Structure formats: C-alpha cells, structure tokens
Amino acid sequence: MTREHSYSIKVRWTGNTGTGTSSFREYKRDHEISASGKPAIPASSDPAFRGDKTRYNPEELLVGSLSACHMLWYLHLCADAGIVVAEYHDDATGAMVETEDGGGHFTQVVLRPVVKVDGEVDPEHARRLHDQAHHLCFIANSVNFPVLCEPTLEFE
C-alpha cells in the first residue's frame, strides 16, 4: 500500500531594498521559509552568491534535512532494537560544484553522527542500524548524489 504525503511551505522574498530587481546588485537575497503555525526560518543565498552569512541558505538546509532525516530514523530503529541513545549529534558536510553556465549541483554529503549509548550494546549492530536508517531515509532516497555516513559510537 502506497501512502502519499504532501508538504506545504511558504517562501517569501524580503530583500527588496526599494528598487526591486532593477539590477543584480540592487536587491538582497533575503527570504523567509515558513509553514502554517511555525516560526519563520530566516534565509538567504550563500555569501558566495551575494547572500547574508547570518541567515541559512538552501544548501545548508538540504544538508540539514539529510542529517535530521537520518537521525530520526536511527533513533526510531534504536528504540525498536532496545538500544538506549543518550546523546546524538552530527557534524554533516556537503560538497557542491558550480557549472560553467552558473548553475551547480551537490557531489556528496557526509554525515558524521556521534551517538552515545547507555548499557550493553553490540557495536556492530548499532552501526548496521545506520545502514538501515540510510536505506529508509526519505530525503536520502530523493537525491541524486551520494550520502555517506561515518558514525562514531560512544558508551555512557
């Protein structure tokens, strides 16, 4: 049985400095990403593309989505397996290349989750759950570049 889900997001440009897009240098790339009943996420383009470095950019949000999706699946699988996760953090990175026409694409994302567990845990089983989480991750299954996972397991 296939179940379909839909997601509604609003993106609102907030970078009009008074002259709209009268020229490439005359407007800010600032915008807000929001959903009904949730706070807005201040966003911009990457500073390399005239963006505001104090705001999230779409590339960071894509890496963050991959990391969060993997984490949520991993926590679920650990709970099902009786593995008690006490802490989880990830220092994920993404690599993107620009193309000659001004576009670009991601070449890979590397997740580096550090997971602290309580109690007796088979380390190999805990690592295999990362493979399963990757297999199940909705976002990783939706991109056309490699998403690698280099997990570290720590014991409480």
Image: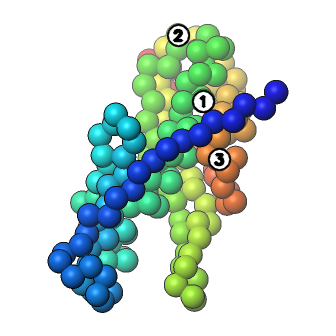
54 lies left or right of 132: left
**SS at mark 1?**
helix
Residue 84: tell me if it is visible. yes
Which numbered mark, 1 or 2, is in the foreground of this view?
1
| Pointer 3 or 2: first along the chain | 2
Task: Residue 151: tell me if it is visible.
Answer: no
* 3 and 2 marks in contact (CB < 8 Å): no
Secondary element at tag 3: helix
**Mark 1 belongs to which amino acid?**
Trp
**Quarter location, residue 156:** top left
What amino acid is at disc 2?
Answer: Gly
Q: Which mark is residue 73?
A: 1
Q: Look at mark 3 in the image and give the residue it sits on.
A: 140
Q: Nearer the viewer, residue 29 or 6?
A: 6
Residue 44 in the figure: left or right of residue 78: left
* 10 Å crowding of disc 1: few (<14), some (14-19), many (20+): many
**What amino acid is at disc 3?**
Ala
For the point 78% across and 32% down, the residue is: 2
Compute the Cα span from label 3 to label 1.
Answer: 11 Å
Dot 2 corresponds to which residue? 119
C-alpha separation, residue under disc 3 versus residue under disc 2: 30 Å
For disc 3, the neighbor class at 10 Å (few under 14, some 14 to 19, many from 20) is many
48 versus 138 height, above or below: below
Q: Position of residue 76 (x, y in %)?
A: 59, 22
The first of marks 3 and 1 along the sequence is 1
Q: Nearer the viewer, mark 3 or mark 2?
A: 3
Q: Which mark is residue 82?
A: none
Q: Secondary structure at mark 2?
A: loop
Residue drawn at x 38%, y 61% is 57
In the image, is 146 to the left or to the right of 47?
A: right
| Earlier-in-chain disc, 1 versus 2 | 1
